Amino acid sequence: MATKNALIIVDLQEDFCPPNGSLAVSGGRDIIPVVNRLLASSDIHLKVATKDWHPVDHISFAANHPPPNNKPFESYAEVINPYNPSERYETRLWPVHCVQGTPGAELVPEMNVRKVDKIIEKGQDKRVEMYSAFKDPFENPCVSESALRGYLKDNGVRKVYVVGLAMDYCVSATARHAVKEGFETYLVEDATKAVDPGEGWDKARAEMDSLGVKFISSGEILDVE
Ligand code: VGL
Ligand code: ZN
């Protein structure tokens, strides 16, 4: 049997999209038609959508930190791994976004969700940021792991196409993680947008490249049909 592949649609949710998203990524809505074409492709065997799914007291929300270092997009906070207190890192603070059960956490309604085989939630543990849709942090001791790795492995997937929002945060972390987990990993460049489209895009692309993520356009995938 030919190698099984999967589409991973990262966080294509209202809060990451204009016009009303609290953490709207510029052009975020424009990728939806491209994602729908990929969802319709019979050359992609398994389709997964992830949802950023935070409790209201999540550590990544600027509003949950004391002033003056609590400005969304600008401030950073120190995060301590609860299982390994010597492991500390700076993490960027965001507007309140994708709170469980709120309209901002909904998948965008234009996406053809009937073609999605599995929805995977991430970022539920208030103590850690979770950009990667696999787990966080990557190295053990892990604080938060989603069902993604098991779902892909159980279904015999070897190759993944990563799309969604935002390219320089959750998409990049998910693609890098996928490589580490042994998947042949492609970023579909016309099906993603960055929070910081200039420098942020370039830096994330270089990071993914150095770890072995490959780059492709949706046309190259859909052409083979
Ligand atoms: C994301 C910032 C905070 C993302 C999630 O989906 O890229 N970015 N939470
Ligand atoms: Zn988030």
Image: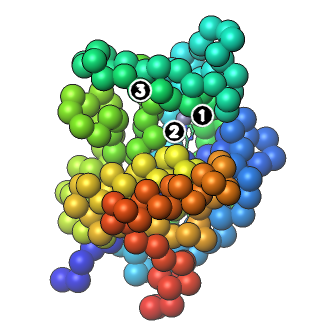
Q: Say whether mark 2 is within 8 Å of ligand 2.
A: yes
Q: Mark 2 — residue? A: 52
Given residues 50 and 89, the one toward you in this image is 89
Residue 52 pos. (x, y %): 51, 39
Per the model, the C-alpha gap separating discs 2 and 3 is: 21 Å
Given residues 191 and 154, the one toward you in this image is 191
Q: Mark 3 — residue? A: 89
At x 53% / y 21%, what residue is drawn?
77
Per the model, the C-alpha gap separating discs 1 and 3 is: 23 Å
- Looking at the image, residue 68 lies above or below residue 221: above
- What's the residue type where badge 1 is placed? Cys
Check disc 3 and report its element: helix, strand or loop.
strand
Q: Say whether mark 1 is within 8 Å of ligand 2.
A: yes
Per the model, the C-alpha gap separating discs 2 and 1 is: 6 Å
Does residue 61 appear to the left or right of 90 in the view shown? right
Quadrant of image for the N terminus: bottom left
Label 1 crowd bin: few (<14), some (14–19), many (20+), radius 10 Å: many
Q: Mark 1 — residue? A: 98
Residue 169 pos. (x, y %): 52, 46
Label 3 crowd bin: few (<14), some (14–19), many (20+), radius 10 Å: few
At x 30% / y 27%, what residue is drawn?
143
Residues marked 2 and 1 touching at CB (< 8 Å) = yes
Check disc 1 and report its element: helix, strand or loop.
loop
Question: Viewer-nearest of labels 1 and 3?
Answer: 3
At x 47% / y 82%, what residue is drawn?
221
Task: Answer with mark 2 or mark 3, whichever residue precedes in sequence.
Answer: 2
